[in-house]
Amino acid sequence: MTVADLKKGQKAIITDSSARDIPLKLLEMGCLPGNEVSLLHIAPFSDPMYLTMNDTHLAIRKQTAALIEVELED
């Protein structure tokens, strides 16, 4: 499962963010294994996705979100 698969309001833990195509800025903002990510809103036409990661709000493209593997929280 990836961040792109999350539904609005779901929370997950990042399990892998090692893809070469993930922007360095996103990694610097905390897109690292073990950190929590939550989907706040999806813009019209499903792009971009608005997330909370490490108490930071950010918007990323669905294409980038598909590179970040997660596991849903219980």
Image (cartoon, rainbow, N blue to C red):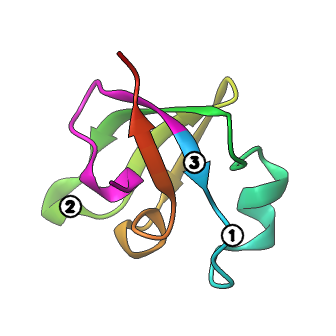
Q: Label 2 crowding class (10 Å Cα cut-off): few <14, some 14-19, many 20+?
A: few
Callout 2: SS? helix
Residue linked to disc 1: 18
25 to 71, vertically: above or below: below
Judge by depth and name the residue closer to the eye, 18 or 62. 18
Mark 2 or mark 1: which comes first in sequence?
A: 1
Residue linked to disc 3: 15
Query: Could you tell me if the residues under marks 1 and 3 are in contact, i.e. CB atoms within 8 Å?
Result: no
Residue type at mark 1: give it: Ser
Q: Which residues are magenta?
A: 1-13
Split into 4 quadrants, where in the image is the C terminus? top left
70 to 2, vertically: above or below: above
Residue linked to disc 2: 46
Residue type at mark 2: give it: Ser
Name which quarter of the figure residue 57 lies in. Answer: top right
In this rendering, the label closer to the viewer, 2 or 1: 1
Residue 55: x %, y % from top left: 67, 23
Residue type at mark 3: give it: Thr
Q: Is residue 10 magenta?
A: yes
Q: Residue at x 47, y 39 (%)?
A: 51
Split into 4 quadrants, where in the image is the N terminus? bottom left
Q: Residue at x 51, y 60 (%)?
A: 68
Residue 46: x %, y % from top left: 20, 61
Q: Residue at x 77, y 58 (%)?
A: 27
Judge by depth and name the residue closer to the eye, 61 or 35. 35
Callout 1: SS? loop
Query: Could you tell me if the residues under marks 3 and 2 are in contact, i.e. CB atoms within 8 Å?
Result: no
